[in-house]
């Protein structure tokens, strides 16, 4: 099966200093499979609430990554709501939770529940929502998470923000993603224009969307003045 550009970029961004990586992406385990191949962490967890997906995934993992062979990396399959994952059994370890392929509102809901349930754990999130990144960023700010890095991915004429945050980072998160606009590339301007068009239409529907439109409009003028 062909691996998407998004999944490849996310996989390449992940470093190898975590004890546990939680693959909560809607990609049928492709990301976690790459992480197992590269032995990126001692423990790779696969999480999805759909039983049929997890049954098929477990069979594939048993075939390609059998647990009875020494590899230095183990895997676990969790058929449950991502919001309810329990990290307490590994509370002294470093965790990375990867959520991609779902909307920003659902991503925000999941991050809020997981971070609230584990306030003392060394916890990081690597997020790639398909939309509503402005609302997601506000949730991350309210959850008192700090920024580690952020970047844009363009795939099939669509743009995706990748946001890496940590419970132990003191770097503030920008509502518009200041780190996304540093190189002043044409693709970034195209993405910003699409955001402005979207929030101009929805600005009358909610105060948050109106705030987003004002913030992105200000950013647009700043970037143009810098040219």
Image: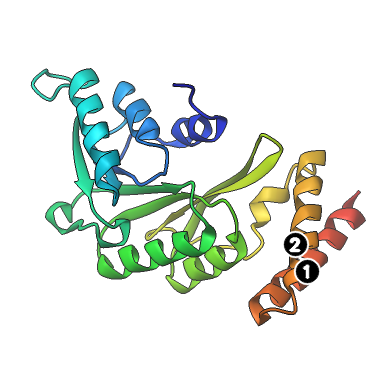
Residue in view at x 39 percent, y 68 percent: 112
Q: Is residue 114 above or below residue 73?
A: below
Residue 211 seen by the camera: yes
Q: Quadrant of residue 41?
A: top left
Q: Position of residue 188 (x, y in %)?
A: 76, 45
The residue nearer to you, when weighing 179 against 68, is: 68
Cβ–Cβ below 8 Å for labels 1 and 2? yes
Is 19 on the left-hand or right-hand side of 97? left
Residue on which the image places disc 2: 198
Kind of element beneath mark 1: helix
Can you name the residue that lies furthest to the left here?
Answer: 68
Q: Position of residue 199 (x, y in %)?
A: 74, 67
Q: Quadrant of residue 117?
A: bottom left
Q: Position of residue 160 (x, y in %)?
A: 61, 46
The residue nearer to you, when weighing 56 against 103, is: 56
Is 61 on the left-hand or right-hand side of 101? left
Residue 190 bears which disc, if any? Answer: none
Residue 201 bears which disc, if any? Answer: 1
Instruction: For label 1, count other residues whose C-alpha is less than 10 Å away and answer few (under 14), some (14-19) or many (20+).
Output: few
Q: Position of residue 70 (x, y in %)?
A: 12, 19
């Amino acid at each position: 099966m062909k691996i998407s550009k998004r999944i490849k970029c996310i996989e390449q961004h992940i470093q190898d200093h975590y004890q546990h990586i939680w693959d909560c992406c809607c990609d049928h385990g492709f990301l976690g499979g790459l992480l197992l191949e590269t032995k990126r962490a001692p423990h790779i967890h696969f999480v999805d609430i759909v039983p049929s997906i997890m049954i098929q995934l477990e069979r594939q993992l048993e075939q390609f990554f059998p647990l009875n062979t020494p590899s230095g990396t183990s895997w676990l399959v969790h058929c449950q709501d991502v919001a309810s994952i329990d990290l307490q059994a590994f509370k002294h370890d470093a965790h990375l939770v990867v959520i991609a392929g779902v909307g920003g509102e659902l991503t925000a809901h999941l991050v809020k529940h997981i971070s609230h349930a584990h306030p003392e754990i060394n916890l990081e999130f690597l997020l790639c929502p398909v939309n509503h990144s402005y609302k997601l960023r506000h949730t991350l700010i309210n959850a008192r998470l700090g920024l580690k890095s952020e970047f844009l991915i363009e795939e099939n004429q669509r743009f995706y923000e990748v946001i890496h945050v940590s419970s132990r980072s003191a770097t503030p998160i920008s509502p518009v993603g200041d780190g996304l606009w540093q190189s002043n590339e044409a693709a970034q301007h195209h993405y910003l224009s699409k955001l402005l068009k979207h929030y101009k239409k929805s600005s009358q529907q909610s105060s948050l969307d109106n705030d987003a439109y004002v913030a992105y409009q200000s950013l647009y003028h700043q970037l143009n003045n810098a040219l």
